Amino acid sequence: MRRSRPPIIRRTLADRIGGFVRDWSVPRQIAGQSSATKAAESALSRGLRPRLDEADTVGTNICPYCAVGCAQLMYAKDGRVIHVEGDPRSPINQGTLCPKGAATLGLMTMPERLDKIKYRAPHSDRWEERSMDWAMDRIAHLTKKTRDEAFVQELPDGGTVNHTQAIGSLGGATLDNEENYLIKKLFSAGLGMVWIENQARV
């Protein structure tokens, strides 16, 4: 003889199924209810809240990926960015972001991102943490050393060139016209660099 389930279990299961059907939005939409009556809502969706509600600070930023210069709104909580979206006040992107710009939050918060200066000395098998001042001094020293060692004043035919081909520059996509103008003046006239390029392309 087959034993039946206790009544309390049957009622609980029936209540759960009935609650699911009542909360399911598809029957309401099939019945003709519109989004104006919130037919697509469920108990779960009614309880959801955007991450923006948790933000205690909102700042602005320019997307770092390409030369378009889309404006972004950066939402932070306790000093940590929790959401990034396009700034609708910008005449450039009017609140929209491409997939790369929309991924800015992941770029900023991924655990693999280095946020400290690492240096590995020649022939060393380990990385060392260094300060920004040390790194800037090191870059300036090596730039001057390389430039002095490879500087050419005259070609064999006597033509004056005053240049070095041992250093090159590749500018970033978010550099504006004014910054590129100064870079060109400094690197060409000041250092005599020949290879100067900018990857300001989408």
Image: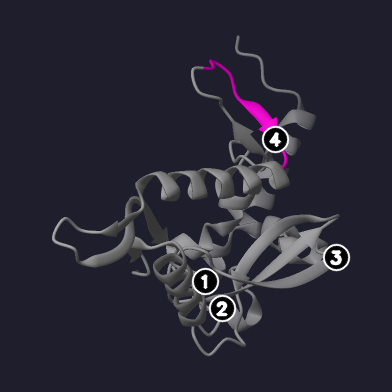
- Secondary structure mostly seen in the magenta stretch: loop
Q: Which residue is mark 4?
A: 130
Answer with mark 1 or mark 3, whichever residue precedes in sequence: 1
Query: Which amino acid type is shown beneath numbered disc 4?
Result: Arg
Q: Quadrant of residue 153?
A: bottom left
Label 4: which secondary element: strand
Pointers 4 and 2 in contact (C-beta within 8 Å): no
Label 2 packing within 10 angstroms: few (<14), some (14-19), many (20+): some
Query: Which amino acid type is shown beneath numbered disc 3?
Result: Asp
Query: Which amino acid type is shown beneath numbered disc 1?
Result: Gln
Q: Which residue is mark 2?
A: 33
Seen at 58% across and 36% down, the residue is: 112
In the picture shown, does residue 200 fall above or below 124?
below
Pointers 1 and 2 in contact (C-beta within 8 Å): yes
In the picture shown, does residue 8 fall above or below 26?
above
Instruction: Judge depth for marks 1 and 4 and give the one in front.
Output: 4
**C-alpha gap between disc 1 and disc 3:** 38 Å
Instruction: Judge depth for marks 4 and 3 and give the one in front.
Output: 4
**C-alpha gap between disc 4 and disc 3:** 33 Å
Answer with mark 4 or mark 3, whichever residue precedes in sequence: 3
